[in-house]
DNA sequence: TGTACATCAGTGAACGCGCGTTCACTGATGTAC
DNA sequence: TGTACATCAGTGAACGCGCGTTCACTGATGTAC
């Protein structure tokens, strides 16, 4: 598979779109074989370009994966934001929609999701990447804030903790039941989406948010 | 680092313990660099043995990782079983202990946990491995059964679903907050253990299991 | 207890391969005047 | 509009390296008698 600008073959000495083509090729390979499953040279070959060309755009293979992850987090945050939809029509429904958006992203973009959460090397020191991941978590955090605000209190749980619970459950389900299988995967008696929705409802019921009242 | 039988150097033509030494060396390398971060040759070198020697014990590198995962699942199941402790003193406390055992395993054996859940290649067709992973899930499943049995009903939730929720939350927290960091990791305002305990309590409260009554 | 022999575990040399990285280069693009 | 020049993106050849895998081998162990 080639990822050149001008179909079918490149007509110019310059590629014109190499950076994007490399990212697209990496996504395909990560989806097929995981973040560890390709080399810098292979991705160049897939883009129809010499093995030295990618160095014009990325310091090394890891930098390419980091960029895949960063772009993934950006789309991920946008998806979660759309699902949350400012808490409409009500917090419980909006959180369910947000959860659905979460799994939908993991399903549509397994390669991005893997680069984001199992890159195979530490991704901590990339400021732009951290910012993108914080934006995504920010959506969940705001959803938890809004949900907690409904709580009658006293005994209102800390919103940060609720956000982490929501995220852990969504990530747990995505990571166990969506994407390339691991040995841990079980057969599911229901879709991951239904499993997450039920889990969120059980959880939120305890918080005084009755899922049936909407 | 060498993993030979007779310290400090091997005195015999035969290693005597090579299989175990290869597994031990793989565990160290996986802990440091992830399941993708070592080669078959490197693990042989670490064991102080020629690059051809590992082939006497494992078909290839993947078979070695699969064995690491299988042994990991065995110890994992035993740990969960000990935490669950047949539901004593009561199901809620026992499930909390089981959750603590879950995270404790991920903390003590990050390399095994990674091999089990992010091997980097499909591990589906290894029957012994599948059996070991089913044994581990079986503990969670039995814990969910016992917890659901306490539910006053009607509206008692399916135990299988509850088991999957418990597992997803524990795995989500382990995978996000324990082990080698990914870009997704947030700073935690509390320990993973406390986060999981709180999450389990909130969840189980909805099931009619009051965590404060024990 | 001793000996012959089969089995087994590890050797070490060899191979072809693809990778990461560098380098001086070259062709295309954009811009100043 | 034309020309000169700087900048930029991709070339292709080269390198050393470690890997995976094979092979005939050898030394140690265990067992039959």
Image: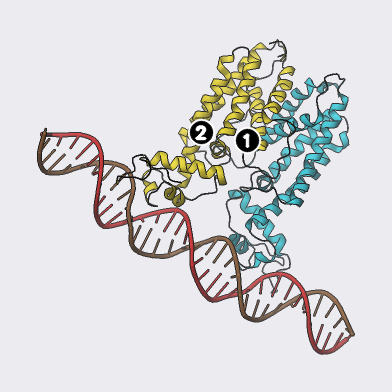
Chain colours: A yellow, B cyan, C red, D brown
Residue A76 image point, x, y percent: 53, 29
Left or right of B178 in this view: C14: left
Residue A75 image point, x, y percent: 50, 29
For marks 1 and 2, give the CA distance: 17 Å
Q: Name the residue under label 2.
A: A72
Q: Is residue B15 above or below residue B62?
A: below
Label 1 environment density (alpha carbons within 10 Å; few <14, some 14–19, many ≥20): many
Q: Which of marks 1 and 2 is in front?
A: 2
Nearest the viewer among A145 and C30 is C30
Which quadrant of the rendered structure holds the C terminus of chain A?
top right
Tell me the residue at 72%/22% (across/down). A203
Kindly identify which chain the residue marked by label 1 belongs to.
Answer: B
Label 2 environment density (alpha carbons within 10 Å; few <14, some 14–19, many ≥20): many
Q: In this view, does A1 lie above or below B169?
A: below
Kindly identify which chain the residue marked by label 2 belongs to.
Answer: A
Tell me the quarter of the picture where residue D3 sits. Answer: top left
Tell me the quarter of the picture where residue A211 sits. Answer: top right
Residue lying farthest to the front in this orientation: A8
Q: Check disc 2 and report its element: helix, strand or loop.
A: helix
Residue A51 image point, x, y percent: 40, 52
Tell me the residue at 61%/50% (across/down). B35
Q: Mark 1 points at which residue?
A: B176
């Amino acid at each position: 598979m080639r990822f050149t600008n001008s179909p079918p073959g490149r007509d110019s000495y310059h590629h014109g779109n190499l950076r994007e083509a490399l990212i697209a090729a990496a996504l395909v390979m990560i989806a097929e074989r995981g973040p560890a499953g390709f080399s810098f040279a292979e991705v160049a070959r897939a883009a129809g370009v010499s093995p030295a060309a990618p160095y014009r755009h990325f310091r090394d293979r890891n930098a390419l994966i980091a960029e895949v992850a960063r772009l993934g987090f950006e789309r991920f945050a946008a998806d979660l934001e759309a699902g949350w939809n400012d808490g409409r029509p009500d917090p419980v429904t909006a959180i369910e929609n947000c959860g659905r958006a979460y799994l939908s992203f993991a399903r549509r973009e397994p390669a991005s999701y893997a680069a984001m959460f199992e890159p195979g090397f530490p991704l901590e020191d990339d400021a732009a990447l951290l910012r993108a991941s914080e934006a995504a978590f920010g959506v969940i955090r705001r959803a938890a804030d809004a949900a907690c605000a409904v709580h009658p209190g006293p005994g209102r749980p800390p919103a940060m903790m609720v956000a982490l619970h929501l995220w852990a459950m969504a990530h747990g389900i995505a990571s166990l039941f969506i994407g390339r299988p691991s040995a841990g995967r079980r057969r599911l008696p229901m879709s991951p989406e239904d499993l997450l929705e039920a889990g969120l409802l059980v959880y939120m019921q305890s918080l005084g948010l009755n899922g049936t009242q909407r």
